Image: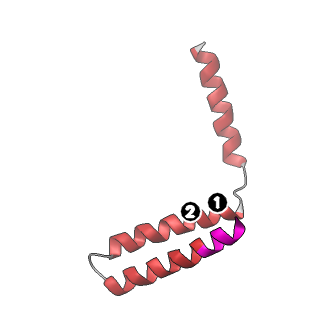
Amino acid sequence: MILVLKNHLAKRYMFGLFKKKSEKEKLQEQYKKLLEEAHKLSTTNRKMSDQKAYEADEIMKQIEKLG
């Protein structure tokens, strides 16, 4: 039973590797990355942090347009 489950999960993972990301998924990754950068910069460079947050906000607007 466990071996069957392992094989099933392995197959799902392998097929997931070749799945193309949608435009929305790409934007969501970009949004997350920008927010992380903004957070890291918030303690050292407020101006750059604000710029990254603004860029993330613009990405979120694009995500919302996609639905």
Q: What element carries label 1?
A: helix
**Dot 1, how many residues are within 10 Å of its Cα: few (below 14), some (14-19), or many (20+)?**
few
Task: Name the mark on residue 25.
Answer: 1
**Front residue of 47 and 2:** 47
Q: In which quarter of the image is residue 47?
A: bottom left
Q: Which amino acid does label 2 sit on?
A: Glu
User: In the image, is residue 42 above or below residue 67?
Assistant: below
Quadrant where the C terminus sits is: bottom right
User: Total marks drawn?
Assistant: 2
x, y percentage for residue 50?
Answer: 40, 82
Q: How crowded is mark 2: few (under 14 residues within 10 Å), some or many (20 or more)?
A: few
Q: What element carries label 2?
A: helix
Q: Which image quadrant for residue 48?
A: bottom left
> Given the current orientation, which residue lies at the most extreme bottom position?
47
Query: Where does the image place residue 59, in percent across and percent down from the top left?
Result: 58, 74
Residue located 57% across and 16% down the image:
2
Left or right of 58 on screen, residue 47: left
Assess whether mark 1 and mark 2 are in contact (beta carbons under 8 angstroms): yes
The alpha-carbon separation of the residues under discs 2 and 1 comes to 6 Å
What is the residue that sits farthest to the left in this orientation? Answer: 43
Residue 62 drawn in magenta = yes
The residue sitting at 71% across, 48% down in the picture is 18
Expressed as whole percent of the image width and height from the top left, the position of residue 43 reads 26, 75
* Residue 29, label in figure: 2
Find the magenta span and give its range.
61-67
Q: Which colour scheme is used?
A: secondary structure
